[in-house]
Amino acid sequence: MPGPNAVFRALADPTRRDILKSLRSGPRTSGEIAASFPVSWPTISRHLAVLRDAGMIAATREGTSISYEIDTTVFHELVEQVLHLVDLGKNARVDRRSGRVSDGALRPAPASRGRHS
C-alpha cells in the first residue's frame, strides 16, 4: 500500500484532481481521459502513472486499450490518517461503504495560546 506522501503528491496537481473527478462517473479509457484535457497524451499518461502509483486508480487492460477507475481504498485510509492528525479520536474509523466517521467524538478546537487582550 502506498504511503501518504504518494497520495498527497498525487493530489497536489490540479490536473490529477480533475482526472479523479472525471472518473467519478465510472471507468474511462486513457484516450477518453486524454481527450478531456488540453495537454498531450504522454502528459496525461504520466499523470495516470502518478495516480496509479499512489493507489488512487486501478488500471484494467481491455484488448489494446487500458481502462481506469477510482480505487477508494486509499481515500478511506487517508481520511483515517487525517482524523488522527487532528486528534478526532484515537479510535476514529471511516466506514468504507458509507464514508462516515464512527467511534471518534468530534472535539472543539483547542483554545488559542496567543496573547489575550
Image: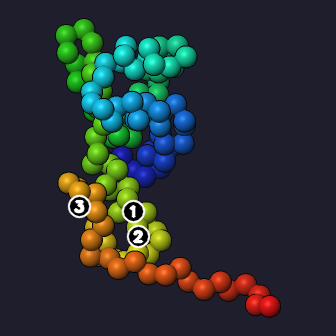
Q: Residue lying furthest bottom in this view?
A: 117
Q: Residues within 10 Å of mark 2 (few under 14, many from 20)?
A: some
Q: Can residue 10 be seen at all in this image of the molecule?
A: yes
Whether residue 94 is situated above or below residue 31 in the rendered picture: below
Q: Which residue is label 1 attached to?
A: 81
* Residue 62 place in picture, x, y as percent: 20, 15
Under mark 1, the amino acid is Gln
Q: Residue at x 37, y 13 (%)?
A: 31
Contact (CB < 8 A) between labels 2 and 1?
A: yes
* Residue 54 place in picture, x, y as percent: 39, 40
Q: Which mark is residue 84?
A: 2
Q: Which residue is label 3 attached to?
A: 95
Which quarter of the picture shows residue 68? top left
Under mark 2, the amino acid is His
Q: Residues within 10 Å of mark 1 (few under 14, many from 20)?
A: some
Q: Residue at x 43, y 46 (%)?
A: 7
Q: Mark 2 or mark 3, which is nearer to you?
A: 3
Q: Residue at x 30, y 67 (%)?
A: 101
Q: CA distance from mark 3 to mark 1?
A: 14 Å
Q: Quadrant of the C terminus?
A: bottom right
Give the structural element (helix, strand or loop) at label 2: helix
Give the structural element (helix, strand or loop) at label 1: helix
Under mark 3, the amino acid is Asp
Q: Can residue 57 be seen at all in this image of the molecule?
A: no
